[in-house]
Image: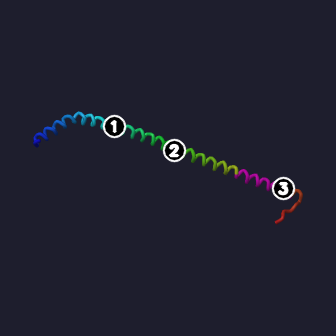
Amino acid sequence: MTQDDLKQIGKVIQSHLKPFSKHIDTLDKGLNKRIETLEIKMERRFEGMERRFEAQDTKLDQLRSDVTATVERVLDTINELHVEDDQRLRRIEEHLHLKRPA
């Protein structure tokens, strides 16, 4: 087999592979497009999840603030009741002419 024969065989093989090469290129382009589409979808989902987490964080911060304010109001009310009770007790003691131990 001569060099020319080998070149001729190579050309024949290339000509037979050429349709497959085009088909492979078409498949590759299709796969790349599909991958790109999936990446875009995943990115959108991730952004949506981030927004939901941020919204939940905001709600959680608001809830913490509300709970803190409620606890402060309860403590203020308890303190006011203690002061009122102490004042009532002093008035009763004064009325009965009792002296508190020092």
- Asked whether residue 12 is drawn in magenta, I would say no
**CA–CA distance in space, label 1 to label 3:** 89 Å
Q: Position of residue 98 (x, y in %)?
A: 88, 60
Horizontally, residue 20 falls left or right of residue 97, namely: left
**CA–CA distance in space, label 3 to label 2:** 56 Å
Horizontally, residue 25 falls left or right of residue 41, namely: left
Q: Amino acid at mark 2?
A: Phe
Q: Position of residue 61 (x, y in %)?
A: 57, 48
Q: Amino acid at mark 1?
A: Leu
Name the residue at the front extreme: 1
Residue bearing the label numbered 3: 91
Residue bearing the label numbered 2: 53
Residue bearing the label numbered 1: 31
Magenta stretch secondary structure, dominant: helix
Horizontally, residue 26 falls left or right of residue 41, namely: left
Q: Earlier in the sequence, mark 1 or mark 3?
A: 1
Q: Earlier in the sequence, mark 2 or mark 1?
A: 1
Q: Residue at x 86, y 55 (%)?
A: 92
Question: What span is colored magenta in the figure?
Answer: 75-93
Q: Is residue 38 above or below residue 101?
A: above
Q: Position of residue 10 (x, y in %)?
A: 16, 39
Q: Residue at x 27, y 34 (%)?
A: 23
